[in-house]
């Protein structure tokens, strides 16, 4: 079927995308501009930021990136599986 999505490719694609976004966030925190960015972004939504961005820690950054990859991969695989399942009912 041409409408099928390869779940492994979807998992890798979404996982890598999520990991890259969180890698960029880790770079922002390491550069010291994380607090300003969080305050600015929440301010655009008329919110005051109740959180303080912690200091950069490489172990935490690696764990964040790995968790983002795993979560994104699970989401990508699940979305592909649901798409493939629902395409059976055409």
Image (cartoon, helix red, strand yellow):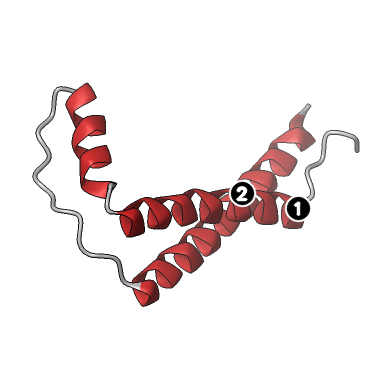
Residue at point 79%, 50% (across, down): 6
Q: Quadrant of residue 87?
A: top right
* Secondary structure type for disc 1: helix
* Secondary structure type for disc 2: helix
Judged left or right of residue 56, residue 87 is right
Direction right: furthest residue: 1
Q: Which residue was labeled with disc 1?
A: 9
Report crowding for label 2: few under 14, some 14 to 19, many 20 or more residues within 10 A (C-alpha): many
C-alpha separation, residue under disc 1 versus residue under disc 2: 9 Å
Judged left or right of residue 84, residue 65 is left
Residue at point 68%, 56% (across, down): 12
Comparing 69 with 90, the one in front is 69
Q: Is residue 37 above or below residue 75?
A: above
Residue at point 78%, 43% (across, down): 5
Q: Is residue 84 above or below residue 59?
A: above
Q: How many marks?
A: 2
The x, y position of residue 59, in whole percent, is 38, 77
Comparing 87 with 13, the one in front is 13
Q: Quadrant of residue 56?
A: bottom left
Residue at point 21%, 24% (across, down): 45
């Amino acid at each position: 079927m041409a409408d099928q999505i390869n779940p492994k490719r979807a998992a890798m694609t979404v996982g890598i995308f999520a990991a890259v976004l969180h890698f960029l966030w880790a770079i922002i925190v390491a550069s010291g501009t994380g607090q300003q960015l969080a305050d600015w972004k929440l301010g655009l939504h008329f919110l005051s930021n109740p959180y303080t961005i912690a200091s950069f820690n490489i172990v935490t950054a690696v764990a964040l990136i790995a968790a983002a990859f795993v979560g994104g991969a699970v989401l990508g695989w699940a979305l592909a599986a649901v798409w493939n399942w629902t395409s059976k009912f055409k």
